[in-house]
Amino acid sequence: MAEFVMTVGGDTVPTAASFGVRNPATGEVFAQAPECSREQLDAAFEAAAKAARDWKHDESARRAVLTEMAEVLKRSVDVLAPVLTAEQGKPLNEAATEVIAAAVWCSYFATLDVPRQIIQDDERALVEVVRRPLGVVAAITPWNFPLTLAFWKIAPALLAGNTLVLKPSPFTPLSTLKVAELLRDVVPAGVVNVISGGDELGALMTSHPVPRKISFTGSVETGKKVAASAAPDLKRVTLELGGNDPAIVLDDAAPATVAKAIFAGAFANNGQVCSAIKRVYVPEALYDDVVDALAEEARAVRVGDGTEPDTKLGPINNEPQYERVKELVADALTHGARAVTGGKAMERPGYFFEPTILAGLSDGTRIVDEEQFGPALPVIAYRDLGDAVERANATHFGLSGSVWSADPERAATVAAELECGTAWVNTHLALSPMQPFGGFKWSGIGVENGPWGLAEFSEFQVLHQSRAPAR
Ligand code: NAD
């Protein structure tokens, strides 16, 4: 693979050290990523601070840049998608979709209205509420959707008039490094800086004196560290953290139909989606039918290397996550669960795990209570709907959830009881740049996307002009 470089101040900065990036389909290191030094981190924040001085002044120029960014992304699918598949493991067509999604986010924010509200206009005063940029944003992303999640941050941050220093996950730094290189032609120097390194580089970013805002997507555990690190300097934070989304099937649902859709909502990206379905509650009367239909879906899906055209599910992205999924499934089996299909790692190189449906288990088992973030789904029987809703809510997580029924209105009434940022009816993972996305409880602070997500990249300012004559 080609060489990958950091972009700081619109240019390549050579690094003294690098680290290997593994292809999860083989487990082998296939490329090197630059290791950002402390001094280079300072230089990146300095470049972003310098660029922010001009960048904040011209909103129409910022919109034009976002529009051009979308064009560059659309033209670069063939360059970026193979890199993303190689480092992340997802099928090539899904990697291409991820690049296009990044373009869609740029286009959406290029035209999103930035409200300037007049709250008083009379003989005494003109009072307006306006938005001001925060300055420099430190952005940190995880390994499941490196590009999509980077652009959930880049696009609104830029429209709001901020500049960024962005660090992707050390498991998937390459597509983000490459995109920054491609964008140099259309983004002014210093506006988007992309650096790479390990977790310790993330910690240095969050405690650095320059950024005024941290936009973080990742695990609950790291999110808490980020919040603690931001506190002494009162940096603004948006935290998009883990989820343990419940799907509740109602007693009037058609098992085969809901199983198909629930399988898609649980196993998208091989289960490595923050808001994937991670536990399913099914009424006792439908339990066996739903479990069997889910197992049928799981048996039929083609697992393989993302570069093979008929692959639907790739490998788990990295070794620690692979070990974690193995551990959680083994723990469930030890505690009386039954693997209706799957249940173990696949005998081949790379981090492949059989698509797994677990039955005969309940809350109190680790794979039900914790976030598995992989291709294994526990299905739990319930007798009383109120009890199922209570169990669905009895968690520190609160990212999203869904309710499935032949009667959407009835389902919506149940969905309204879910304590989570997005409550779906007869669908799951329906996301768009217009919808605010975020979590209740430990699943996060703040939201991304839509005008609400944009607002989090700015401070409100009251501009109060007295109409009394100056003396
Ligand atoms: P992670 O928390 O281990 O790492 C995320 C990023 O934080 C990486 O870039 C990492 O290098 C960096 N990091 C690690 N330690 C840090 C520290 N002390 N300070 C600052 N940065 C640090 O998460 P992950 O394993 O990469 O991603 C999986 C998790 O992300 C899952 O829990 C998933 O649910 C969550 N996620 C949430 C959303 C959302 O929008 N809510 C989206 C995708 C993934």
Image (cartoon, rainbow, N blue to C red):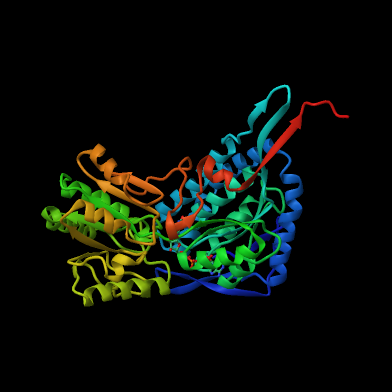
Residue lying farthest to the right in this orientation = 471
Viewport quadrant of the C terminus:
top right
Name the quadrant of the N terminus: bottom right
**Does 58 appear above or below 206?**
above
Q: Position of residue 441 (x, y in %)?
A: 43, 57
What is the x, y in percent for residue 81? 48, 55
Query: Residue at position x 35%, y 61% from top?
Result: 395
Residue 263 in view of the camera? no
- In the rendered image of this protein, does residue 81 appear above or below residue 121? below
Horizontally, residue 96 falls left or right of residue 160, namely left
Residue at 85 percent across and 29 percent down: it is 470
**Is residue 121 shown to the viewer in this render?**
yes
Taking the view exactly as shown, the residue that stands out farthest to the bottom is 334
Outermost residue on the top side: it is 123
Residue sitting at x 19%, y 40%: 406
What percent of the width, then of the height, locates residue 431?
41, 45
Of all residues, the one furthest to the left in this rendering is 285
Looking at the image, residue 49 sits to the left or right of residue 92; the answer is right
Total count of labels:
0
**Which of the 4 quarters of the picture holds residue 424?**
top left
- In the image, residue 167 lies at what x, y percent? 59, 62
